[in-house]
Image: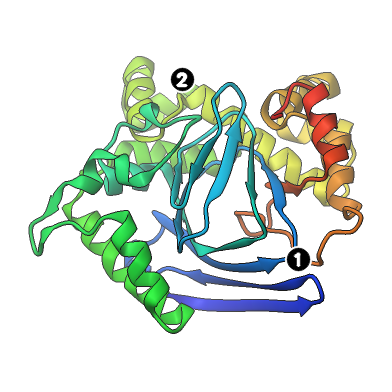
Amino acid sequence: MADGVRSRAGAGPWGSWETVLARPHPRLRPGVISYRGVRLALDRPRRRLEAPIGAATLLLGFGEPLRITRTGRPPATLVSVFSGPTTTPAVGEHGGRLSGVEVLLMPWAAFTLFGTPQYELADRTVDPDDLPHVLGTRPDAGRRRSIGELSAALAALPTWQDRFGLLDDELTRWSQAGTPSSARVVRAWSELVRTWGSVPVRLLAEEVGWSVRHLENRFREQIGLGPKVAARVLRLQRARRLLAQGRGQAETAAICGFYDQAHLSGEFRAMTGCTPREFTMARVIPPVAQPMVPAADRMTGEATSLLLTSARSSVFSKTGGVR
């Protein structure tokens, strides 16, 4: 059973909201990182910018559509969403109502659950029912439950605890029937995460006993990004965390292994669509006339997203971000 359940809720003239966080059953960890139940009933549309993180995301929606725009790709309107590892920002928007469960996954666990080479899904947002493994079968119960069927079953349950319990059972069956990820890929990924992307790829290959080329090929298959690109994402993830904690840009650049402050700023623009200052200030200063709904960062303790206003959206467009 999922544990560590934490819930928050609020209501006002602008509507109501509820978020519920939980850790999956120990048998699913560390591949399945967390569950987050969401229920929003607001009086206006809501838009968020999502920055790249070192994880894959599966949203099991309960009926309300979400429109997602990613740099260089046409918008996608989906109820349930899978997003693999990314190097570019995305904007998600809805009409004010949204409900479902978000499952955060290690990239190699997504490879096992869905049986799809992760490089095919990098920097993409897709309907998870279109992934090949979802359409397959599991040996213990015949036809595998589709994402749409699972979402409907989750929505019909009376409590979030019941929903998380069903997810534990379903994801365990999927994992047991899936393609096992390589222990060496898991080890290499864990070392990259532990060092926030600072370990050289050559040393990473030596650590797991592979050539650099073989490591790169297996990494792209099961993580979605090559180890050098994945390291960039993890370094910037750490930089966002430090800046959100009040560290200066020069200090953050030095700690995270950027050449200098200009290098940090360039990576920020490339992967979030804005400068470090714009990103940090947007998180510190709340948008005017927005409902008091707490930040929806996908990873606990990380600075992963921004609530957008029209003014902020125009800033990101000028800097090359999502329009």
Circle 2: is it few (<14), some (14-19), or many (20+) Cα within 10 Å?
few
Residue at the image position 45 percent from the left and 24 percent from the top: 226
- Asked if the residue under mark 2 is in contact with the one under mark 1, i.e. CB atoms within 8 Å, the reply is no
- Tell me where residue 180 appears, x and y as whole percent: 22, 45
Residue 222 shows in this picture = yes
Q: Quadrant of residue 88?
A: top right
State which mark lies toward you, 1 or 2. Answer: 1
State the residue at coordinates (71%, 32%).
Answer: 272
- Measuring from the top left, give residue 124's x and y in whole percent: 48, 32
Identify which residue is drawn at 42% across, 42% down: 107
Figure check: 309 above or below 253: below
Q: What percent of the width, then of the height, locates residue 244?
A: 81, 49
Q: Residue furthest top?
A: 213
Task: Evaluate whether residue 275 shows in this view.
Answer: no
Q: Locate residue 160 relative to residue 305 in the image: left or right.
A: left
Q: Which residue is label 1 attached to?
A: 293
Q: Give the secondary structure at mark 1.
A: loop
Q: Residue furthest bottom?
A: 158
Seen from the viewer's position, the closer of residues 275 and 11 is 11
Which quadrant, please, contains the C terminus? top right
Colour scheme in the image? Answer: rainbow
Nearer the observer, 193 or 76: 76
Q: CA distance from mark 1 to mark 2?
A: 45 Å
Check the image and report above or below for 58 versus 115: below
Q: Which residue is mark 2?
A: 202
Q: Is residue 231 left or right of residue 279?
A: left
Q: Nearer the viewer, residue 209 or 179?
A: 179
Amino acid residing under circle 2: Arg
